[in-house]
Amino acid sequence: MIRINVDLNSPLPAYQQIIQSLKIEVLSGRLKNGDRLPPIRELAKLLKLNPNTVAKAYYTLESEGFVESRPGSGNWVNVRAPGLDGLKRSMLDGETRAYLDRAFSLGAGLDDVRNSVERIAAHE
Amino acid sequence: MIRINVDLNSPLPAYQQIIQSLKIEVLSGRLKNGDRLPPIRELAKLLKLNPNTVAKAYYTLESEGFVESRPGSGNWVNVRAPGLDGLKRSMLDGETRAYLDRAFSLGAGLDDVRNSVERIAAHE
DNA sequence: AAAATTGTATTATATTATTAATACATTTTT
DNA sequence: AAAAATGTATTAATAATATAATACAATTTT
């Protein structure tokens, strides 16, 4: 059984919490390629949210390529060829791209980035 | 003369554009430690914004430690001991911290991060 | 000490983002 | 072909954020 946590007190919007939960389910292996997601209405009822809020989460995941929506049929996990590790990698690469953009716009070079990563990681 | 660009058509809020401009001025060396920033009202008039919008930018920079506000006196650039390179480093480190948080919460390890950084950087 | 200059706080307005209400269209099942 | 289950679109209500209007407090200058 998959786990989807939505805390209405959190500052993070509900639809983003759904997205985050589903990504974690995929990364953990509890959701696999080809699996069917809960129907929009069903999940909405469970979370006490409007169906449109769930639909927004699914729609966003679809635009990211992780989900395929079929009217009348349902929403399906779409994790292509590379499998689980590939998915994790592509999600990480998205974060890395955004980070490098910000770093370079600060005038940092790749060496600066490497140093910063090692320095901060060492302090965890 | 320092440069502060605010484009009201940009989706980025005006106060954030001010913050960004000022950080660039510091990194470029046009603003140095101990320099005085333009008075809130003066900059607001120049940019055709409400003084509170400029104040919000200054206040945020203060909370980040880059500015010191003194009522009646003004706002002063506060870049401590390490100098310019140190400032760049501390700004970069802030970005790195946020990035590593996101990466680790995806389940990535440090090796994954190193690989991703090198792979993405190579494609620039 | 008075006036001018400066940052701060409070409240109101406008804009944007999020969520909800409702009706519609497609597919599947019977 | 009818009914049920599903995703989609349109519009409205709500909440969050950004900006502005105005009044206040502290400092500096004269």
Image: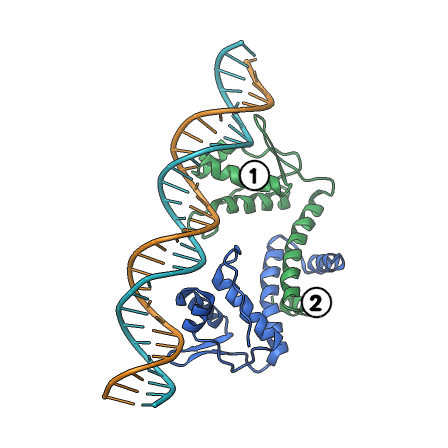
Chain colours: A green, B blue, C orange, D cyan
Q: Does any portion of residue A56 appear in the rendered image?
A: yes
Choose between D29 and B31: the one closer to the eye.
Answer: D29
Residue B107: image location, x then y, percent: 63, 53
Chain containing mark 2? A
Inspect the image, locate mark 1, and give the three-letter code of the amino acid beneath it. Answer: Tyr
Inspect the image, locate mark 2, and give the three-letter code of the amino acid beneath it. Answer: Arg
Which residue corresponds to mark 2? A114
Mark 2–mark 1 Cα distance, whole angstroms, equals: 36 Å
Residue C16: image location, x then y, percent: 47, 50
Residue A62: image location, x then y, percent: 61, 39
Q: Give me the disc on residue A7.
A: none
Residue at the location (57% across, 28% down)?
Answer: A71
Q: Does any portion of residue A39 appear in the rendered image?
A: no
Residue at the location (66% across, 55% down)?
Answer: B108
Choose between A102 and A24: the one closer to the eye.
Answer: A102
Chain containing mark 1? A
Screen quadrant of the C terminus of chain A? bottom right
Classify residue C13 as left or right of residue B49. Answer: left
Choose between A57 and D27: the one closer to the eye.
Answer: D27
Q: Quadrant of residue A65?
A: top right
Question: First in sequence: mark 2 or mark 1?
Answer: 1
Screen quadrant of the N terminus of chain A? top right
Residue at the location (57% across, 35% down)?
Answer: A37
Q: Quadrant of residue A61?
A: top right
